[in-house]
Image (spheres, rainbow, N blue to C red):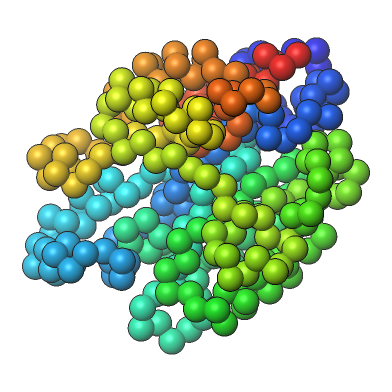
Amino acid sequence: MDHIGKDDINHEEWMSCLPEKLWDVPLTHLSIPGSHDAMSYCLDITSPLLRSESDTFRLLDGVFCCFTRPAIYRWATTQVQTIVEQLAAGIRYFDLRIAHKQYDSSNELYFTHVIYTHATVIETLQTVASWLESHPKEIIILACSHFEGLNYKRHEEFIYSLKKIFGSKLCPCNEVLLTLRSLWTSGYQVVLSYEDQSTSHHKELWPAIPYHWANKPNAEELIHYLECQKQLGRPGLNLTTDRCFIASHPRVSLRTLTMENWNCVKKWLEDQKPGAEPTCLNIIAGDFIGPVPFCSLVIALNKKLL
């Protein structure tokens, strides 16, 4: 393969299809598509609110749940494709927010975004590990964060499960240089970012990856924010808004907001480039990565490195 056009990308195995010239480029210099709140496609609308939600919101939800629950579902759902469909689409960075339900006597962990998911963490990650078995040259980054309700004991149990699920696929954090070629040679496929310093003694866990959350309701404000943040790190790419906006726009959802602003965001995205310079992008995480050609655009940026 001599070039990476948007129309000839094999999304499912795009890393192994990159030109050989890019096999020795550090992973941090490649353009990698990511999924913001990757598991929000299976939110359980009947589950309790996260314990971190405010008492006021909790009271409103208790009294007016017929209004709050549809609104939560419209605005907390950021993806519609399953984790396997996202992998097949080319997503290689996954924003995974993890929690243990309050008053739950089991050790089961769930993904979260305001409420909990139907899917459990361990079963989902076992599915991801199975996918990697059949795609041995694809590298993924799992960014585990939030951990609401996890004490030290539950952290250690979860990390034990992670090691058991991914085994020798886990890339240790003492690896000096991560390139596709070096990872393939070592058999590593998973870079595991873990947002909890109490577990830093585990060599399989990488530090938390910085993520810039724009919290802007339109493309112009989002792009202005991202341009400002490019000097500080590699931003994520998602439109969000506050609860005042949500309450005053009952017919709007995060999905409709994303679709309305996509063309403007797309033009900005096409102008970006990966690489070593401070203003270059690396991981670009988006919402609703299936309904828009997000992955194709992000993967195609790598041709600018040739």
Query: Going 42% across and 63% down the picture, which residue do you hit?
Result: 118
Instruction: State the image coordinates of residue 271 (x, y, percent, origin top left).
Output: 52, 13
Which corner quadrant holds the C terminus?
Answer: top right
Query: Going 32% across and 58% down the picture, which residue do you hit?
Result: 114
Residue 259 shows in the view? no
Instruction: State the image coordinates of residue 84 (x, y, percent, origin top left).
Output: 59, 47
Query: Going 59% across and 43% down the picture, which residue do you hit?
Result: 93
Residue farthest along the bottom direction in this orientation: 105
Tag count:
0
Instruction: State the image coordinates of residue 297 (x, y, percent, origin top left).
Output: 56, 21
Q: In this view, does 152 lie above or below 124?
A: below
Which corner quadrant holds the N terminus?
Answer: top right
Residue nearest the viewer, comparing 106 with 141: 141
Residue 245 shows in the view? yes
Residue farthest along the right direction in this orientation: 185
Q: Is residue 190 left or right of residue 168?
A: left
Query: Going 80% across and 12% down the picture, which residue do you hit?
Result: 2
Name which quarter of the figure residue 88 lies in. Answer: top right
Name which quarter of the figure residue 205 lies in. Answer: bottom right
Residue nearest the viewer, comparing 52 with 189: 52
Q: In this view, does 69 lie to the left or right of 137?
A: left
Q: Is residue 25 above or below residue 8?
A: below
Instruction: State the image coordinates of residue 168 (x, y, percent, origin top left).
Output: 82, 60
Name which quarter of the figure residue 103 lies in. Answer: bottom left
